[in-house]
Image: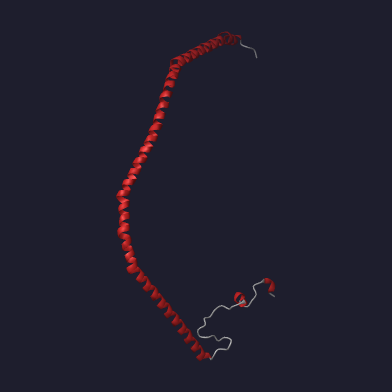
Amino acid sequence: MARQPCAYSLYRWVLTPLGHLTAWVVKGVVAGAGWLLRWLVVAPLTAVGRVLAVVLREVADALGHAWRIAGRISLAVGRALATLLRWIFVEPVRWAWRAVFAPAGRLVRDVLLRPLGRAAREGARAIGKALVTARMTVREVRREVRTALFGSPREGLARPAGEHRREPAGPEARTLGSSTTALTKD
């Protein structure tokens, strides 16, 4: 492919130097703008920043002291309010409890509740004794009916009238006559 001399010459001798010139001018303008920005904005702000740093540090220190002082003041105010509320609400209630309600409660307990409790316990004991007597009477009647219908029981099965039925005693109690061990089973 052959080069076109006119386009190549135009690119090489006109456009390239024009691009280099444009780049050189842009670099100069950017450098000048940077220099102006540095000396017209940054340099004055540096001094202002140094002054502001000192001022802000002092303001922060002052706020720290004020915060501590406000904390102590609020603590004192809170304690004063707590004491006032205790005097207004808690102390009268404590006095009323100690002077009025507790003695009244003790009086109610001693005069009313203890005798009622004692009477209720005695009534429960009487009912329990009556139930035991009724249970024994029913057992005796059942035994007499059984004796009347079937005759007297055999010697090994007869129990005295006052003896309660219980679980077997001794080794029979645990196994009820059979083995619980796999090794002793046939």
Q: Position of residue 81 (x, y in %)?
A: 33, 44
Q: Position of residue 71 (x, y in %)?
A: 38, 37
Q: Position of residue 13 (x, y in %)?
A: 58, 8
Residue 173 picture quarter: bottom right
Q: Residue at x 43, y 15 (%)?
A: 40
Residue 44 picture quarter: top left
Tell me the quadrant of the picture where the N terminus can be found. top right
Q: Residue at x 62, y 75 (%)?
A: 175
Q: Is residue 118 above or below residue 34?
A: below
Q: Residue at x 36, y 39 (%)?
A: 74
Q: Nearer the viewer, residue 155 or 63?
A: 63
Tell me the quadrant of the picture where the C terminus can be found. bottom right
Q: Is residue 149 above or below residue 104?
A: below
Q: Nearer the viewer, residue 53 or 148?
A: 53
Figure coloring: secondary structure
Q: Is residue 106 above or below residue 119?
A: above
Q: Nearer the viewer, residue 132 or 46?
A: 132
Residue 179 picture quarter: bottom right
Q: Position of residue 106 (x, y in %)?
A: 34, 64
Residue 11 falls left or right of residue 80: right
The number of callouts visible is 0
Q: Residue at x 60, y 74 (%)?
A: 174
Q: Is residue 165 above or below residue 13?
A: below
